[in-house]
Amino acid sequence: MTHDHDDRLWDGLSKTYEMIEVENRKLSLAPEHLPNKGDRILDVGCGTGSHLFLLGKISRDVVGVDISPSMCRLAARHAKTAVADARGLPFQDGTFDYIWSRVVLSHINPWEEAFLDSLRVLKPGGTMVIIVSNFWSFMTPLRRLMVKSGLYSLGSCRHFSTRDFRNLPGILIKAAYAVPKRATSDSPLFLAGARVLYALDRFLGALVDRWGGDLCLVMKKTPPGGSVPTCGNRGASS
Ligand SMILES: C[S@@+](CC[C@H](N)C(=O)[O-])C[C@H]1O[C@@H](n2cnc3c(N)ncnc32)[C@H](O)[C@@H]1O
């Protein structure tokens, strides 16, 4: 595995990550989309492991992978972890019942490679929850401006809509809804404004469902020859 520029950024961010991930203390999911007790769970791009901790309260069989060795070391406080690239996961096909990946695909290029490898290690009928930066959020132009001006330094950050996932093979989208943004960046200027921005995000997200900062997609892996993917209902964020 090679470490490119973006990956070293994550190593550098790991020590302060939990300080700035101030609101990262719950799973933003309707209860029917949570894993079942005893499920084999994988967190792809687990960061410092705050979701490993939360998922571990539901099932004890939880594993996290992250490309950053420093992130992995911190995450290992909560569960088994492995340093791995999401584009080449070190697991056999159909290993997991439930895959969780929050704000990771937004930072991987090409993101489809990582998506398809997660799908590969998911059991047919298994659930995959993908949370990505939402194209329809008011923060999208703002963030693009910050990336351009160098204020936001987490490398590339892609914004998604449900349209991006609609034609991918092997999945059925069960639910797609926007949730308020939770992650922040390592830029002091961004951090200072984060609380205001996120309050605005929550307000706008409450006003129009699709405007929330993050897009949460809940998908089922269709069995071989299963039904064609369709876009499911919108649900409220919890
Ligand atoms: C914004 S952080 C999200 C961390 C965690 N999922 C959360 O919600 O707090 C993105 C994470 O993705 C990891 N990452 C970036 N590229 C990756 C790749 N190609 N394979 C695996 N992990 C990757 C980074 O190291 C970082 O921990």
Image (cartoon, rainbow, N blue to C red):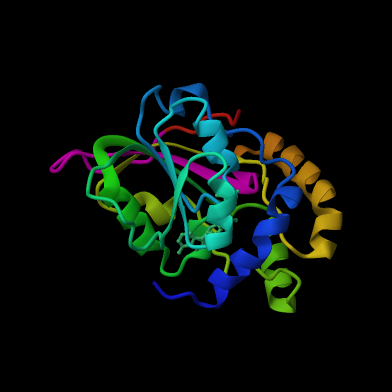
Tell whether 38 sits left or right of 54: left
Q: Is residue 133 visible?
A: no
Return the residue nearer the eye: 39 or 152. 39
**In the rendered image, the vertical position of residue 37 relative to residue 73, given as above or below:** above
Q: Position of residue 178 (x, y in %)?
A: 58, 41
Residue 209 inside the magenta-drawn segment: no
Q: How many marks?
A: 0
Residue drawn at (52%, 42%) of the image: 216
Front-lying residue, 53 or 120 = 53
Indicate left or right for 6 with 181 as reference: left
Q: Residue at x 68, y 72 (%)?
A: 147
Q: Magenta stretch containing residue 217, yes or no?
A: yes
Give the magenta range: 210-232
Residue 90 seen by the camera: yes
- Residue 53 versus residue 152 in the image, above or below: above
The one nearer the camera, 170 or 123, is 123
Q: Give the x, y percent position of residue 75.
A: 56, 47
Q: Is residue 6 left or right of residue 14?
A: left
- Find residue 87 and report its image quarter: bottom left
